[in-house]
């Protein structure tokens, strides 16, 4: 990890982050309601920080910078206004979504550093799975060669983060053709499966957990 991407400052008073793994696909509306409620509870001090790993049914989400012209096939899957940063993205089975609810009041109010930390987390996770992930000047997220393997979209309210990352483990990559993913015209999308590497979701989750602790700090047992 470079000096510029050291873990966000974390006071000793913050307890370890709660780590939740959903056992079945979660409807987007339910996920959004949970995130917003949890973020408010974190800001109010009644709940602690949380990372929620899940999969969604096939759907598209539109960030605050989404260009309607980049929704190529609007009738293919449900489309949701995500109210996060970024443009259009796809979520579906075989993609690990991690919603990250952290308190930047206690970690330093530095949104850029937080996003860099998310990229570091994905790169660490991929390295543990034998894949070299990199950043790109073309946009936020993580790439393998010229292809994008993970996306990042966040929202911050009262300095508490929500939304997060999506890592392509073994999704149907053809489903991305209904949008211009993240507004990156001509940029291919890849996955761990397409690269011929680890696709067992439990093993991917274990790599995500280890990588998160290296970048952001301890997780509750």
Image (cartoon, rainbow, N blue to C red):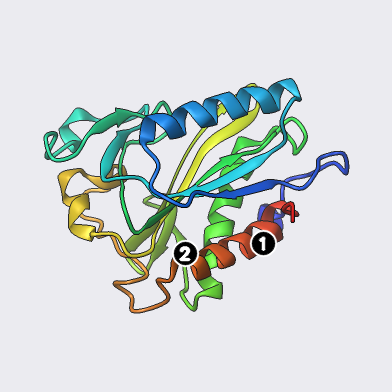
Label 1 CA crowd tier, 10 Å (few <14, some 14–19, many 20+): few
Disc with the residue nearer the chain's start (1 vs 2): 1
Q: Using residue 208 as the reference point, say whether residue 24 is left or right of it.
A: left
> Is residue 51 visible to us here?
yes
Q: Quadrant of residue 94?
A: bottom left
Q: Using residue 89 as the reference point, say whether residue 53 is left or right of it.
A: right
Q: Quadrant of residue 101?
A: top right
Query: Residue at horizontal 76%, vertical 25%?
Result: 45
SS at circle 1: loop
Query: Residue at horizontal 31%, vertical 35%?
Result: 61
> Is residue 124 visible to us here?
no
- The circle on residue 2 is 1
- Above or below: residue 20 compared with residue 161: below
- Above or below: residue 173 compared with residue 102: below
- Above or below: residue 193 compared with residue 117: below
- The circle on residue 130 is none
Q: Using residue 194 as the reference point, say whether residue 115 is left or right of it.
A: right
Residue at mark 2: 134
- Above or below: residue 87 compared with residue 185: above
Q: Quadrant of residue 69?
A: top left
Camera-side residue of 2 and 215: 215
User: Where the N terminus falls, by quadrant?
Assistant: bottom right
Residue 120 rendering spot, x and y as whole percentages: 58, 58
Label 2 CA crowd tier, 10 Å (few <14, some 14–19, many 20+): some
Camera-side residue of 4 and 119: 119
Query: Residue at horizontal 23%, vertical 59%?
Result: 173
Q: CA distance from mark 1 to mark 2?
A: 13 Å
Residue 24 rendering spot, x and y as whole percentages: 41, 50
Q: Extreme right residue here?
A: 12
């Amino acid at each position: 990890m470079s000096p510029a991407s050291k873990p966000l400052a974390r006071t000793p008073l913050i307890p370890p982050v709660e780590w939740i793994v959903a056992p079945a696909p979660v409807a987007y509306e339910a996920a959004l309601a949970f995130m917003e409620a949890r973020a408010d509870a974190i800001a109010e001090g009644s709940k602690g920080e949380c990372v929620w790993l899940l999969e969604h049914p096939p759907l598209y989400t539109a960030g605050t910078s989404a260009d309607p012209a980049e929704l190529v096939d609007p009738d293919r899957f449900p489309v949701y206004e995500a109210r996060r940063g970024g443009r259009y993205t796809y979520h579906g089975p075989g993609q690990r979504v991690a919603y990250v609810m952290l308190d930047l009041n206690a970690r330093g109010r530095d949104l850029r550093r937080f996003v860099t930390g998310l990229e570091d987390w994905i790169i660490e996770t991929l390295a543990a799975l034998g894949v070299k992930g990199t950043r790109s000047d073309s946009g936020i997220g993580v790439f393998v060669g010229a292809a994008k393997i993970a996306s990042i979209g966040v929202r911050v309210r009262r300095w508490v983060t929500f939304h997060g990352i999506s890592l392509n483990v073994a999704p149907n990559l053809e489903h991305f053709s209904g949008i211009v993913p993240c507004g990156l015209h001509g940029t291919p999308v890849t996955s761990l499966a397409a690269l011929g590497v680890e696709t067992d979701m439990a093993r991917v989750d274990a790599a995500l957990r280890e990588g998160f602790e290296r970048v952001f700090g301890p997780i509750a047992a």
